[in-house]
Image: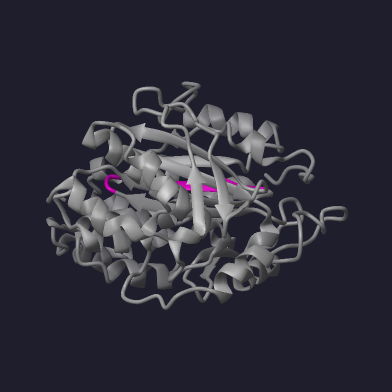
Amino acid sequence: MPTDTMSGFSCSEQSLSSAKDSKTKAMLRWAFNAGKWQPTEKQWRSAAAIIQDEERARIGRFVFVDDTKLAMVGRLLMRQAVRSALGVHNREIRLARTKENKPYLEAPPSAQLPHFNFNVSHSGDYTVLAASPQQLVGVDVMEIRHPNNDVGEFFRLMRPQFTPIEWDDILAPACDMDRLHLFYRYWSLKESYIKAVGVGLGLDLQRLEFTSAPTLTPQTRHNLTTATLKVDGMLDSNWRFSQTYLDNDHCVAVALGPRTDAIPSYLSALQSHSEPVPGNASVGAGTAGHTGTRLLEEKQEPGMFASLTDMLTETITYYTNDTPGDAISAQETTAATELDVTFTHFTFDDLTIHRDVSPSEEEEHTSFWDLFCKKRVKKPRKLSDE
């Protein structure tokens, strides 16, 4: 069974605890090491039977084994998160995507958790998920790897993506590896925010400026919650951030903020599956979608990149082997509380324990296993997020 990296509780113990405490059951931070997962035929067929037809089609188009596994785990994490938070059967769950390609829960609606939302990310060996019952949530995991060429040249190529103040922080350490750690941590902060609001491609990253203490290390593994954000030079105190390490080579950032900061298409998607709870209609601050709308209206052309991490890894190529509870009020659930939630490491059995599929349904996907076996094993590292 998986254990919480801080508390030591098993996944099943954590699930029981969450069921008793409806105020925290939807505050999810899950991680799965897909790099260590070598799927059996039964596992792969079982996973295929759980997900939607269009999800299988998307996964089937991946060329490489690593991408295929990471993508499958992402779908399983999302479905298990919905099932766990809302207490519904897998067959009831319907996932969809905004026009910016951001996954969201289309059905079923929830009166208990009308603002429940989630986000997934994958990089290196890991796929991660963050979910929130109230706040907009974004998550980004980054594998920390040394570039093939000179670190200084790598930073020169990436200079337009950070502000001068951010570069001062990134370049402050004397050691190149320490600088790379800060670079990837700042990168994950930016992408966690962009993914939370659903803005998608083409944003000038210098419009976002973060400050973060350099004290977090892979050895400490605690949550660092002191990062601050400026958007177009103005401090946005509505947003809070948590940073941690999953292991020595993977850092994670989680962004939490008011749901009304989502861009219009994502805000509309969130509202479409909600059954508003009396007294919760005015959650958030400001005009609906005002921050996301402003970012969206002033975006650049997206160009060739499918995500921020695609832009990063296109610049420098890496090679590698490859039951519903009570309603939650805005006052009870705060970003500050959620920042303390630590990542729980999952196994495949945890993701499929409530799969609601029969052996005959699994048998229908033998060809999907055959397709997986034909995937290529080694590839240039090219990352993408959802």
The image quarter in which residue 67 lies: bottom left
Residue 69 in magenta stretch: no
Looking at the rendering, the stretch of residues picked out in magenta corresponds to 124-133
Quadrant of image for the C terminus: bottom left
Which residue is located at x 50 percent, y 21 percent?
A: 7
Whether residue 74 is visible here, answered yes or no, is: yes
Q: Is residue 226 left or right of residue 135?
A: left
Which residue is located at x 57 percent, y 76 percent?
A: 297
Q: Where residue 379 sits: x, y (%)?
A: 14, 59
Residue 129 in magenta stretch: yes
Q: Where residue 354 sits: x, y (%)?
A: 50, 47
Q: Where residue 238 sits: x, y (%)?
A: 67, 48
The one of 279 and 237 positioned closer to us in this rendering: 237
Q: Is residue 53 left or right of residue 230?
A: left
* 168 versus 273 height, above or below: above
Q: Is residue 59 left or right of residue 314?
A: right
Quadrant of image for the N terminus: top left
Which residue is located at x 55 percent, y 34 percent?
A: 226
Whether residue 82 is visible here, answered yes or no, is: no
Among all residues in the image, which is located at the extreme right? 278
The image quarter in which residue 271 lies: bottom right
* 366 versus 342 height, above or below: below
Q: Main secondary structure of the magenta part?
A: strand
